[in-house]
Amino acid sequence: MSVRSLFSSGRPSARPASGAAGGGLALDRGAPLTEVGFEAARSALGVDAPRLLAVMRIEAMGCGFLADRRPVILFERHVFHRRTAGRFDARDPDVSAPRPGLYGPAGANQHARLARARALDENAALESASWGLGQVMGFNARIVGFADVRAMVAAMEAGEDAQLAAMVAYIRATGLASALARGDWRAFARGYNGPDFARNAYDRRLAEAHRLYETGGLARPDLGLRALQMFLLYAGFSPGPIDGQDGPRTRRALAAFRAADGRGGREAAAPGEEDRRALLAALASASERAA
């Protein structure tokens, strides 16, 4: 199943559906994961929520976007080397070399490395980075249902629904959905992480996360709250982990935003639709000023 077929509209959308995690509110890019996107992914894999949540907790990034709403990426110089036959190795060994390494810091630095590689070979550069929640490599664009890597990147930039759908499509394309459905965590971890999966105990970590979600030891993330955490992050506040769990850091960030928005620092007040609308208005205003 392709990414596109996970969505009834026929294309991944950055706009959360009404009543979904985004509360019917839209971002032009960096849209948070919605209940619609989560349920589409779960249904496509044919698994219950605890299994998908376990995979997301262990194998996916906590958040698919940086604070500036660019997707989380990791640029792989050895992949760029292979896809360009090494012709840029001498010119820029940081972005083209036979062996992995010299990653440097996460975040903006990875986009800076990608930009240098794009100036050398656009398509090969995009294919040499892993993208979003599931860190799907760009060279897998076709097997996860996109016409080419540029179409995949556009979807990864739009929102986490498409990012999760790409991860799900990769799991299906590589034959790992059946291992996931039957709870064969060893087979799933080996297929998803390669032969070194045991070094980081991915199989045991997946099994434990699944057990905790199934028994209530881990609470299912509130995707509405998680969306609000992302909006706070984008607006320049620090909500802590983007995890959909209510906590003091999220409350403090929300109080700071309310104070900056002229509504007082009501730290004890529960977040709601008014906060999301105010945050989106602030983000829209910031985008217009930047433009």
Image (cartoon, rainbow, N blue to C red):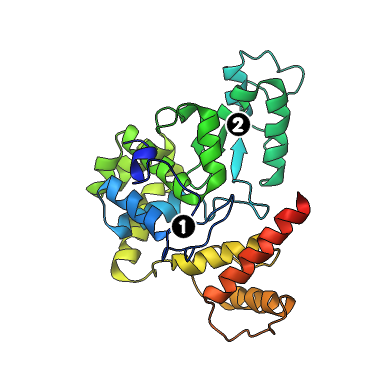
Residue ID for mark 2: 76
Pick the front one: 86 or 67: 67
Q: In which quarter of the image is residue 17?
A: bottom left
User: Circle 1 sits on which residue?
Assistant: 16
Of residue 147 and residue 100, the one placed in the foreground of this image is 147
- Residue 169 percent coordinates (x, y): 37, 38
Query: At x 68% / y 65%, what residue is drawn?
Result: 282
| As drawn, 214 above or below 94 | below
Instruction: Pick out the residue farthest to the left.
Output: 182
Image quarter hosting the N terminus: top left
In the rendering, which numbered label is found on residue 261?
Answer: none
User: What amino acid is labelled 2 in the image?
Assistant: Glu
At label 1, the amino acid type is: Pro
Q: What element carries label 1?
A: loop
Picture coordinates of residue 258 (x, y %)? Answer: 67, 78
Rounded to the nearest whole Å, what is the CA distance between mark 2 and mark 1?
32 Å
Residue 122, horizontal then vertical, whole percent: 64, 24
> What residue sits 65% from the left and 59% below the top?
234
184 left or right of 71 in image? left
Which of the two discs, 2 and 1, labels the residue nearer the N terminus? 1
Q: Nearer the viewer, residue 86 or 111?
A: 111
Q: Observer-nearest residue: 286 or 42? A: 286
User: In the rendered view, would you say 211 is above or below 180?
Assistant: below
Of circles 2 and 1, the one toward us is 1
Asked if residue 94 shows in the view, the reply is no
Q: Reply above or below: 202 against 76.
A: below
Q: Where is residue 88 in the image (x, y as percent from the top left)?
A: 71, 17
Q: Residue at horizontal 29%, vertical 46%? A: 45
Q: Count residues near mark 2 (Cα–Cα under 10 Å), then give few for <14, some for 14-19, many for 20+.
A: many
Q: Is mark 2 on a helix, strand or loop?
A: loop
Residue 209 visible? The answer is yes
